């Protein structure tokens, strides 16, 4: 089986981390295709190379001298090379890059983070280096040309049999460097996995996978061993992010599982993300709980609105006019609410409400702000009746007022609105009642 092993920034931040990567790659002959991010933070408060390179661009744009900054970046690579006794001419290559810095495009400059890191890693692992600019092909609009990319990746795979590929960037057919979004090394790994028909996409990072709740709220939460792509989408959307969200699409379409692993604790199983759970695996009721604070719910009431065609659409078009994306629309018979992210409407909320009043003439319009949304996610919830009732009951007993409820269409999540100040308590109550208790009864 071919495994793609993608190592994130913290996994390649220093010589010490490089050693861990080597041990991991060499412990499994299936790991022949390695993707790396740019060297990341070595410790809290340290800088990621990508951020430093973005800073270089800002210096150039404002005509500020960036010699010292470039020297810092160079030193990071030199330290790794010297400590590992590598012979790749890092100083020469960096000097050429720095000498021509003003001739390079901003994307080219930022992409050097992964380019230098991958060169060093390739030598250290004894694998060939493949430049992403030669194999990951972008259209001019910034989307990947999957057909060309697949053909090129398959070709190098056959020719070389193994390689190290820098993540995060590619190039148009005329050689212009293009970048993915931040964290985009994960996307490169997923594209490679898909294009060369890998059996598994391993994503090595600095956590042992997804946790079932935020460890800042819940003490020592259970790790999630298996999760479906849909569940992961729900959890990441609500803030429990480990993987670049866009990274799941290339692999999910062709059914390649992703395994999140911890470079610093390779013995931990991590989390495996698949399209469908296998029968008999992890019958946990709740897979995870996530959420975010600071939403606003605008409640619109009008008698007989359910018979008025286009009423909801007209309300939503007002939000659209202000460029505000709508998170949820819980509906009643003669009323509905529009839930939006507080930060998105900071400057426009009063104009939006005024427009709704004028254009829709509702009987009543009111607002609840400082609302936190909490998503309880679990593919098994739909199979067991009474789950939502039990969750609401538990929150009620704890004196937490639920201000809004919606359920996702596939019934894999229940989303509840509570006051911002009740958020942590609500997560804790649901975790204790449904996850911790389950752990006690099954252990
Ligand atoms: N180096 C890039 C970033 O920091 C991409 C990545 O790390 O995946 O966003």
Image (cartoon, rainbow, N blue to C red):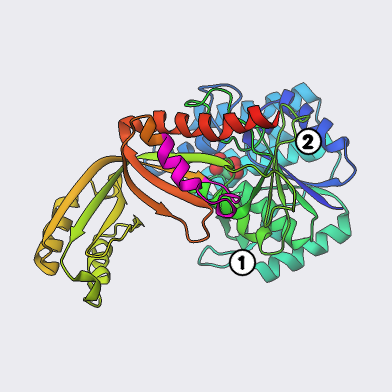
Mark closer to the chain start, 2 or 1: 2
Tell me: residue 80, above or below residue 164: above
Q: Is mark 2 within 8 Å of ligand 1?
A: no
Q: Based on the displayed image, in which of its 4 quarters is residue 322 positioned?
A: bottom left
Q: Is residue 386 magenta?
A: yes
Which residue is the extreme one toward the front?
Answer: 386
Q: Which mark is residue 174?
A: 1
Of 378 and 87, the residue lying toward us: 378
Of 158 and 351, the residue lying toward us: 351
In the picture, measured across the screen, residue 361 lies left or right of residue 5, that is left
Q: What's the residue at 24%, 42% (across, down)? A: 369
The Cα–Cα distance between marks 2 and 1, rounded to whole angstroms, is 28 Å
Q: Residues within 10 Å of mark 2 (few under 14, many from 20)?
A: some
In the picture, measured across the screen, residue 135 lies left or right of residue 42, that is right
Q: What's the residue at 70%, 65% (across, down)? A: 149
Q: Quadrant of ligand 1?
A: top right
Q: What's the residue at 45%, 33% (across, down)? A: 427
Q: Position of residue 110 (x, y in %)?
A: 55, 44
Of 348 and 129, the residue lying toward us: 348
Of 283 and 82, the residue lying toward us: 283
Residue receiving disc 2: 88
Given contact means CB atoms under 8 Å apart, are the residues at marks 2 and 1 in contact?
Answer: no
The C terminus - image quarter: top right
Q: Is residue 268 visible?
A: yes
Which residue is the extreme one toward the bottom?
Answer: 309
Kindly report the secondary structure that dominates the magenta region of the rendered protein: helix
Tell me: residue 405, above or below residue 371: below
Q: What's the residue at 12%, 57% (across, down)? A: 364
Q: Which residues are magenta?
A: 377-394
């Amino acid at each position: 089986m071919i495994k793609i092993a993608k190592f994130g920034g913290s996994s390649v931040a220093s010589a010490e981390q490089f050693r861990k990567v080597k041990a991991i790659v060499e412990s499994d002959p299936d790991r022949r295709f390695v993707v790396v991010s740019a060297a990341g933070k070595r410790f809290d408060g340290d800088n990621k190379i990508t951020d430093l390179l973005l800073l270089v661009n800002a210096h150039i744009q404002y005509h500020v001298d960036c010699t010292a900054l470039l020297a810092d970046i160079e030193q990071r690579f030199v330290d790794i090379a010297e400590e590992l006794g590598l012979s790749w001419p890092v100083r020469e290559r960096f000097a050429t890059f720095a000498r021509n810095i003003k001739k390079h495009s901003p994307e080219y400059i930022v992409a050097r983070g992964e380019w230098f890191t991958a060169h060093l890693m390739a030598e250290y692992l004894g694998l060939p280096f493949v430049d992403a600019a030669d194999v990951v092909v972008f259209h001019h609009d910034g989307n990947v040309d999957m057909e060309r990319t697949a053909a090129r990746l398959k070709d190098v795979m056959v020719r070389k049999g193994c390689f190290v590929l820098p993540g995060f960037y590619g190039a148009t057919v005329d050689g212009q460097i293009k970048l993915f979004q931040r964290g985009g090394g994960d996307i490169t790994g997923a594209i490679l996995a898909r294009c060369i028909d890998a059996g598994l996409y391993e994503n090595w990072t600095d956590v042992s996978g997804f946790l079932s709740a935020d460890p800042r709220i819940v003490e020592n939460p259970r790790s999630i061993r298996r999760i479906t792509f849909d569940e992961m989408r729900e959890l990441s959307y609500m803030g429990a992010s480990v993987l670049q969200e866009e990274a799941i699409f290339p692999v999910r379409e062709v059914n390649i599982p992703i395994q999140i692993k911890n470079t610093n604790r390779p013995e931990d199983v991590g989390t495996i993300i698949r399209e469908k759970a296998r029968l008999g695996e992890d019958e946990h009721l709740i897979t995870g709980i996530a959420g975010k604070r600071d939403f606003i719910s605008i409640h619109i009431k009008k008698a007989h609105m359910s018979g008025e065609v286009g009423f909801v659409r007209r309300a939503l078009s007002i939000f659209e006019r202000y460029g505000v994306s709508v998170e949820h629309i819980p509906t009643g018979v003669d009323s509905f609410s529009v839930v939006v992210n507080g930060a998105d409407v900071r400057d426009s909320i009063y104009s939006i409400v005024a427009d709704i009043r004028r254009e829709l003439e509702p009987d009543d319009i009111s607002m609840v702000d400082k609302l936190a949304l909490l998503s309880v996610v679990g593919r098994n919830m739909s199979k067991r009746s009474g789950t939502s009732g039990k969750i609401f009951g538990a929150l009620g007993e704890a004196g937490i007022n639920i201000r809004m409820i919606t359920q996702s269409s596939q019934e894999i999540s229940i989303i509840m609105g509570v006051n911002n100040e009740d958020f942590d308590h609500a997560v804790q109550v649901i975790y204790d009642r449904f996850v911790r208790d389950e752990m006690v009864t099954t252990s």
